[in-house]
Image (tube, rainbow, N blue to C red):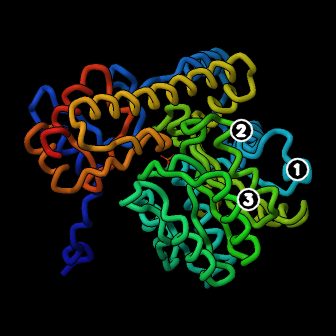
Amino acid sequence: STLFSAIEMAPRDPILGITEAFNADTNPAKVNLGVGVYYDDNGKVPLLECVQRAEAHLIATVTPRTYLPIDGLVAYDKAVQELVFGADSNVIAQKRAITAQAIGGTGALKLGADFLKRFAPDSQVYISDPSWENHRALFESAGFVVNNYPYYDAVTHGVNFAGMLDSLKSMPAGSIVLLHACCHNPTGADLTADQWTQVIEVITTRGLIPFLDMAYQGFGAGIEEDGKVVRRFADAGGPLFVSNSFSKSFSLYGERVGALSIVSADAAESARVLSQLKRVIRTNYSNPPTHGGKVVATVLSTPELRALWESELAAMRVRIKANREQLVDLLKQKAPGHDFDFVKQQCGMFSYSGLTKDQVDQLRNNNSIYAIDTGRICVAALNFSNIGRVVDAICQVL
Ligand code: PLP
């Protein structure tokens, strides 16, 4: 036998598998609600105007493509840190936060995981049940044991907060707790401000290590509002890990722009943390690519472009909310016995619709409407021309 002859086929990615089936479907009225990206009302992934203007500016000011610093573009790291923690943040003033450019939100999570495996090798990781499907695989591939904490309650379509809190209270000190800072993927169910207070309290008093994943800042209640959870954790002191992504909020999926921030006790600790994080980066991909970081840094630090970005992101957020309302209203008219009001309470791009696997199969087989087996739909993929068909099809399978 050779090196490769005994290798088995890896399982297919469940979400990419849906896209493959969707692409192969010849029904012209097919609808893909399984996607993890923002589609506009024409069913297209937008290229934001603020990005186009920043790119035009970058092309006009030609620069050589030297290597970036290991931890990324300085202007990017600074602008991102201010966005994530707030420009007036104490942890920034006290130099207790470090921020490194990363290869998207995924890359930021992987840097954090590799860093933690070096310095907290015996800790275990806890993720929400359910969570973004890559969280488990990513921390396992960094060498951690990954457990679930209770999160979603299918009966109330909300958070099983008592279960979550009990679980936090029983974790050993030093456990790593992954939390979605806003717009929980896949459920759309977020904690209230009061529930966050209790979570922060338990995590701080029990000496757990919080790792906030913020992939949807600006898609919930607003850029500032969504960042509040990060700020509250930062105010509670370190250690704190924050991964953030601009894939969705800048519609820059393929440019792979994200960052990892780490909050520690003081400036001296932060300097040591950064030096070790750079080693993780250096031995992984050496330094990040230039283009996406420059675009985001240009937009965030140029006042007109920043204002434009904020308005374009607000438009995406508002459109998703309108889609939720329209979906619920149409379902109320056509399936009066069923209550979908919870969909309006959910945050971000996704909704756990409550559809069962069997109903999802029927939608796919009978109507060429593709959702995830768990019932997750991307609310942004609904639009003016497909929503009526989607609602009629859902009514047939209820
Ligand atoms: N974290 C969550 C919760 C996500 O939903 C996603 C993307 O879907 C990511 C991280 C990864 O983001 P990126 O595409 O920037 O790697």
* Left or right: 151, with 118 as reference point: left
Q: Residue at x 67, y 39 (%)?
A: 225
Q: Residue at x 74, y 22 (%)?
A: 302
Q: Residue under circle 2?
A: 76
* Left or right: 282, with 132 as reference point: right
Q: Residue under circle 3?
A: 262
Mark 2 residue crowding within 10 angstroms, few (<14) / some (14–19) / many (20+): many
Could you say where residue 293 lies in the image, as x and y percent from the top left?
A: 63, 37
Give the residue type that dot 3 points to.
Answer: Ile
Is label 3 in a helix, a strand or a loop? strand
The residue carrying mark 2 has its beta carbon less than 8 Å from ligand 1: no
**Disc nearest the viewer among 3 and 2:** 3
Q: Residue at x 37, y 21 (%)?
A: 41
Give the residue type that dot 2 points to.
Answer: Tyr
Q: Residue under circle 1?
A: 90
* Left or right: 274, with 8 as reference point: right
For the residue pair 27 and 365, the one nearer the viewer reads as 365
Are dots 1 and 3 in contact, CB under 8 Å?
Answer: no
Q: CA distance from mark 3 to mark 2?
A: 16 Å
Q: Earlier in the sequence, mark 1 or mark 3?
A: 1
The residue carrying mark 1 has its beta carbon less than 8 Å from ligand 1: no
Give the residue type that dot 1 points to.
Answer: Asn
Is label 1 in a helix, a strand or a loop? helix
Could you say where residue 4 lies in the image, as x and y percent from the top left?
A: 24, 72
Farthest-out residue, front: 337
For the residue pair 163 and 20, the one nearer the viewer reads as 163
Q: CA distance from mark 1 to mark 3?
A: 14 Å
In the picture, the quarter occupied by the N terminus is bottom left
Is label 2 in a helix, a strand or a loop? helix
Q: Earlier in the sequence, mark 1 or mark 2?
A: 2
Could you say where residue 240 lies in the image, as x and y percent from the top left?
A: 72, 62
Asked if residue 114 can be seen in this view, the reply is yes
